[in-house]
Image (cartoon, rainbow, N blue to C red):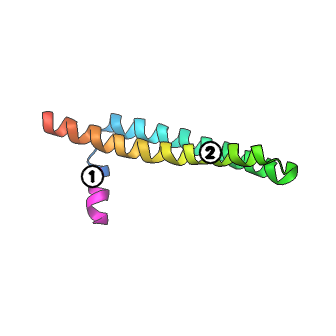
Amino acid sequence: MLKLIINTFNSMEEQIKKIMKYGIRFAVLVCFFAIAILITYTFNLSPDLYYIGLSVFKLGLFFIVEFIICALAINTIKKQTG
């Protein structure tokens, strides 16, 4: 199963890999921003900061998953259409 996933990512077109790579980098930056908000929460103890930081962190993780799934879908569609 792991070999299938690795082969799928290796067989992607370079343009799709590039978009996925930059998208994942953006999502990781969003996660780091959320972690900074959560660290600020430990000093301020404001519940609003906690919920904002948690929501932004979830958003970053969602972006990572979304970029991976969309890249796989676009790659599959391009292979099927020729």
User: In the image, is 21 to the left or to the right of 77?
Assistant: right
* Residue at 31% in and 65% down: 2
The image quarter containing residue 77 is top left
How far across and how far down the image is residue 31, in percent? 61, 46
Mark in the foreground, 2 or 1: 2
The quadrant the C terminus occupies is top left
Q: Disc 2 marks which amino acid?
A: Ser
20 vs 41, nearest the viewer: 41
Extreme-bottom residue of the structure: 1
How far across and how far down the image is residue 56, in percent? 62, 43
What main secondary structure does the magenta stretch of the protein show? helix
Q: How far apart are marks 2 and 1 (CA)?
A: 31 Å
* Residue at 31% in and 58% down: 6
Q: Mark 1 points at which residue?
A: 8
Point out the stretch of residues depicted in magenta.
1-8
Mark 1, Cα crowd under 10 Å, few <14 / some 14-19 / many 20+, is few
* Residue at 27% in and 52% down: 8
Q: Disc 1 marks which amino acid?
A: Thr
52 vs 36, nearest the viewer: 52
User: In the image, is 43 to the left or to the right of 29?
Assistant: right
Extreme-front residue of the structure: 47
Q: Name the residue under label 2.
A: 55
How far across and how far down the image is residue 60, in percent? 56, 44
Looking at the image, do the residues carrying marks 2 and 1 touch, with CB atoms under 8 Å apart? no
User: In the image, is 38 to the left or to the right of 30?
Assistant: right
How far across and how far down the image is residue 17, in percent? 37, 41
Residue 46 part of the magenta-drawn span:
no
